[in-house]
Image (cartoon, rainbow, N blue to C red):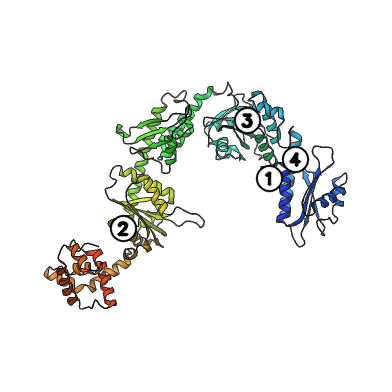
């Protein structure tokens, strides 16, 4: 970007870009010299540089019009005739742009963009020569030195320059202290007491400091960055178009330089560049002392913060809302923890680490306040914070009591909201999985925010009863965590099982992978075994039931086995994954009953145990292993196998017969086996 470079460097970069991208043999900018007596300043990029620059200078006349006529001849850099364009500043001819395109090259619309860029740079060059007393783009050395020493008397001169350079009605300076932008010094405000306080990250100036980049709003009265209290002050001055430029400090501080107009008239590109260079010229930001007259209005600031807190008490159901408000108010980190030291806000482990990290001598101390919860039960945990300002604030002696009360109200509401919504989603998914959903099921699923027509099912399982202590809190934390990672929530179906319905993402919009999601869950709700199954897609609402049962079935089977893999795709789960597909499992169950019917009928008539022994032996692969599982002698197993083969009338030595019977045995054991024939 040209506004990130010095004037001469920006011009050279623009000309070199023209030669490279059009393409062209050469490009030149000719204009009156802004400082010295020499009538012309020439910049050139391209081939045969020395010869072409001499050729250019030999053809320059006292006027731009005459020079333009002489520059249309052939030059050393090209055998083709050049394009010569007149550049204007404020409607008056201010320079010439000369371009030698390659034969057959058509600059087309790009030539208009180059002309506009060079006209902006000519305006910047003129502004630097007109307004700045030092080298291009810098302040007068005496003014810069006074500001660097913290001389408050030099600030009006700087703000006057800002108003002149930017064509602004008001200019003001905000110092960054304790996580707050304090606007204390101004020029052009009608109210002599003009000023305000703004938390970092909020409003126009707070966002400029937090992002480290210029923030511009065409119309402050109708922008998204209005901040309570501040907007009242600026509206009183009829502030409209506003530019806020961050000024880096020497040791984590800094400032904001504002230029504002009382009309909706955005700043021109040249004005933005010049104002950024003014700000750059005073870096590192001088540590100006606070204005003595301003922050007797701390009481007003406290009143505004109290009003924001009341809004949270009335309407918020997110712990992060309270934490964010606290961080703005105290100028430091704040984390809400439950009774087991888990953050209420998924993803807030970093904030917790900042709080418990060791601090150097003289750093702010960490405060810890208990959250008594409803009825003083102590179940909500505690609030940890590290303020950079003195607490309680002036004019708010009940600050801590009010904050803790707000935390308890918001946390109660958050838990109630989560519990109600999770119960509704869980009930709906359970009915879909059991085939009991009514004719309005689609509408109900959409109302609950679930992708009912198309998506993918992920299932998570853990040991039932392993997390009974604080189970509701863990479910809420897990839901928020998965929501942050995947964009869709984790819904608890029953004890030890949760499901995520993932909607399709637009091309190029990624999400966390299964292993990363499992690792994050373990980080918050571990330790303990946790299985995650993914890869079960559904193309319609009618497919959803089968997809749910397949994913949940595989997750439960993996938990029952108690072994790896802890993360698996259904297609990678072998025969178990296939058999959890309801269509496949129903067909296989019917097939198994037909194949094993002689054994089933025999057992039903005489109370024998041929079916279980036969299926377990085939599945395990040997009579000895089956005997261990059935707690009988191996000869007993062999005897039963002989009886079973006679009743079935099938030859197990034939591969086709053995495969069919083994598959039938595996399917039968999964669905109907009793304690005598435990699932292997």
The residue carrying mark 1 is 2
Q: Quadrant of residue 644?
A: bottom left
Front position among marks 2 and 1: 2
Instruction: Give the Cα separation between the discs numbered 3 and 4.
Output: 25 Å
Front position among marks 1 and 3: 1
Instruction: Give the Cα separation between the discs numbered 4 and 2.
Output: 71 Å
Instruction: Give the Cα separation between the discs numbered 2 and 3.
Output: 65 Å
Give the mark, 1 or 4, whose residue is nearer the N terminus: 1
The residue carrying mark 4 is 125
Q: Could you classify mark 4 by the number of other residues whose Cα lies within 10 Å: few (under 14), some (14-19), or many (20 or more)?
A: many
Give the mark, 2 or 3, whose residue is nearer the N terminus: 3
Instruction: Give the Cα separation between the discs numbered 1 and 4.
Output: 12 Å
- The kind of secondary structure element at disc 3 is strand
- Point out residue 277 in the picture as x, y percentages from the top left corner: 67, 37
Is residue 494 at all visible to an observer of this figure? no
Q: Is residue 503 left or right of residue 127?
A: left
The residue carrying mark 2 is 558
């Amino acid at each position: 970007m040209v506004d990130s470079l010095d004037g001469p460097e920006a011009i050279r970069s623009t000309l070199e870009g023209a030669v490279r991208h059009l393409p062209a043999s050469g490009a030149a900018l000719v204009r009156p010299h802004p400082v010295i007596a020499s009538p012309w300043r020439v910049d050139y990029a391209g081939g045969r540089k020395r010869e072409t620059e001499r050729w250019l200078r030999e053809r320059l006349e006292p006027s731009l019009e005459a020079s333009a006529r002489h520059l249309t001849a052939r030059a050393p850099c090209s055998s083709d005739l050049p394009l010569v364009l007149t550049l204007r500043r404020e409607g008056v001819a201010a320079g010439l742009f000369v371009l030698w395109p390659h034969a057959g090259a058509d600059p087309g619309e790009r030539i208009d963009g180059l002309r506009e860029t060079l006209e902006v740079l000519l305006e910047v060059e003129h502004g630097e020569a007109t307004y700045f007393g030092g080298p291009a783009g810098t302040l007068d050395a005496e003014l810069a030195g006074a500001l660097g020493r913290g001389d408050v008397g030099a600030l009006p001169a700087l703000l006057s320059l800002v108003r002149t350079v930017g064509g602004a009605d008001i200019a003001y300076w905000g110092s960054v202290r304790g996580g707050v932008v304090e606007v204390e010094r101004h020029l052009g405000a009608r109210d002599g007491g003009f000023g305000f306080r703004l938390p970092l990250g909020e409003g126009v100036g707070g966002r400029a400091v937090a992002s480290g980049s210029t923030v511009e709003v065409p119309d402050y009265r109708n922008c998204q960055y209005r901040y309570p209290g501040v907007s009242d002050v600026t509206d009183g001055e009829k502030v409209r178009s506003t530019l806020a430029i961050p000024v880096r400090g020497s040791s984590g501080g800094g400032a904001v330089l504002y230029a504002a107009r009382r009309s909706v008239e955005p700043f021109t590109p040249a004005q933005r560049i010049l104002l950024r260079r003014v700000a750059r010229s005073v870096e590192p930001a001088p540590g100006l002392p606070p204005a003595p007259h301003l922050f007797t209005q701390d009481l007003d600031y406290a009143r505004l913060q109290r009003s924001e807190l009341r809004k949270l008490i009335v309407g918020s159901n997110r712990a992060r809302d309270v934490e964010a408000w606290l961080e703005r108010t105290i100028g430091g980190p704040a984390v809400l923890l439950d009774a087991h030291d888990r953050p209420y806000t998924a993803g807030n482990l970093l904030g917790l680490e900042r709080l418990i990290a060791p601090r150097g001598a003289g750093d702010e101390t960490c405060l810890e306040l208990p959250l008594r919860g409803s009825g003083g039960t102590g179940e909500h945990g505690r609030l940890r914070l590290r303020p950079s300002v003195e607490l309680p604030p002036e004019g708010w002696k009940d600050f801590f009591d009010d904050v803790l009360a707000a935390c308890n109200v918001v946390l109660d509401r958050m838990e109630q909201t989560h519990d109600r919504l999770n119960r509704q989603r869980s009930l709906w998914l359970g009915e879909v999985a059991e085939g009991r959903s009514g004719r309005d099921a689609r509408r109900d699923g959409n109302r609950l925010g679930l992708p009912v027509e198309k998506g993918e099912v992920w299932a998570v399982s853990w040991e039932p009863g392993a997390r009974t202590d604080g189970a509701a809190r863990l479910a809420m934390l897990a839901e928020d965590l998965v929501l942050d990672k995947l964009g869709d929530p984790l819904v608890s179906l029953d004890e030890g099982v949760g499901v995520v319905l993932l909607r399709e993402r637009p091309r190029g919009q990624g999400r966390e992978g299964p292993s990363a999601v499992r690792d994050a869950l373990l980080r918050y709700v571990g330790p303990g075994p946790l299985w995650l199954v993914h890869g079960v897609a559904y193309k319609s609402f009618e497919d959803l039931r089968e997809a749910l049962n397949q994913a949940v079935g595989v997750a439960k089977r993996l938990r029952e086995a108690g072994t790896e893999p802890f993360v698996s795709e259904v297609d990678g789960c072998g025969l178990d994954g296939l058999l959890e597909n309801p269509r496949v499992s129903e067909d296989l169950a019917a097939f198994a009953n037909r194949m094993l019917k002689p054994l089933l009928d025999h057992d039903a008539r005489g109370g024998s145990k041929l079916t279980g022994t036969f299926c377990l032996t085939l599945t395990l692969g040997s009579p000895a292993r089956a005997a261990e599982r059935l707690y009988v002698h191996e000869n007993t197993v062999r005897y039963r196998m002989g009886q079973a083969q006679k009743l079935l009338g099938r030859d197990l030595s034939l591969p086709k017969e053995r495969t069919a019977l083994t598959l039938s045995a595996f399917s039968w054991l999964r669905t109907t086996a009793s304690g005598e024939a435990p699932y292997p």
